[in-house]
Amino acid sequence: MSPTAGGGTTPTDALAGPAARLGFSKGMVVQELGWDSDTDDDLRVAIEDALDSDMVDADYGNVVDAVVLWWRDEDGDLVDGLVDSLTDLVGGGAIWLMTPKVGRPNAVDPADITEAAPIAGLALTTTAAVSKEWAATRLVTPKSRG
């Protein structure tokens, strides 16, 4: 049962939706790379609310549970960006590659992501629309066969 009469959602609840769908939860350490003035601030706030802390930056210097990588077509070589984002990622952690949706300025062709992931040693698992302008692609290191 919902503790609120009518079970309605508040604006904050609505924003928490994408962050929860991405698997972020309280206590995780998430590194944010590629932030710029065009990133989705509502999504960023929702992620930090789910974590109950701020995301850390590239200078953090310790292992992180996940990486949020904002990437645009003009940002250069995607393989290099993905490899760089692995630097502090703990084994089993995920990279959430945030790219402008198809048709938006600086959109990244989904085929480029599919091609870049294995070169960077990653496997693509999930893609989700997380905001009006941005899509998220979950990348993980493949489980080793042994």
Image (cartoon, rainbow, N blue to C red):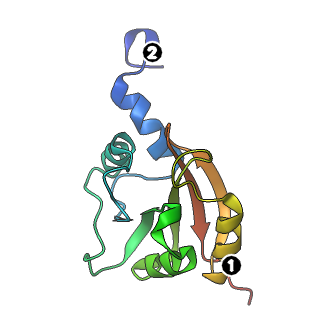
Residue indicated by mark 1: 118
Above or below, 3 relative to 65:
above
Tell me the kind of residue under disc 1.
Pro
Q: Are marks 1 and 2 in contact (CB under 8 Å)?
A: no
Residue 84 place in picture, x, y as percent: 45, 81
Q: How many marks?
A: 2
Q: Residues within 10 Å of mark 2 (few under 14, many from 20)?
A: few
Residue indicated by mark 2: 7
Q: Which residue occupies 51% across, 49% down?
A: 105
Residue 120 place in picture, x, y as percent: 60, 81
SS for callout 2: helix
Residue 114 place in picture, x, y as percent: 70, 67
Frontmost residue, 4 versus 32: 32
Frontmost residue, 16 versus 108: 108
Frontmost residue, 146 versus 61: 61
Q: Which residue occupies 31% across, 50% down?
A: 48
Q: Residues within 10 Å of mark 1 (few under 14, many from 20)?
A: some
Closer to the eye: label 1 or 2: 1
Position of residue 49 in the picture relative to residue 95 (left or right): left
Q: Quadrant of the C terminus?
A: bottom right
Residue 43 place in picture, x, y as percent: 39, 44
- The tag on residue 66 is none
Position of residue 30 in the picture relative to residue 135 (left or right): left
Q: Quarter of the image holding residue 92?
A: bottom right
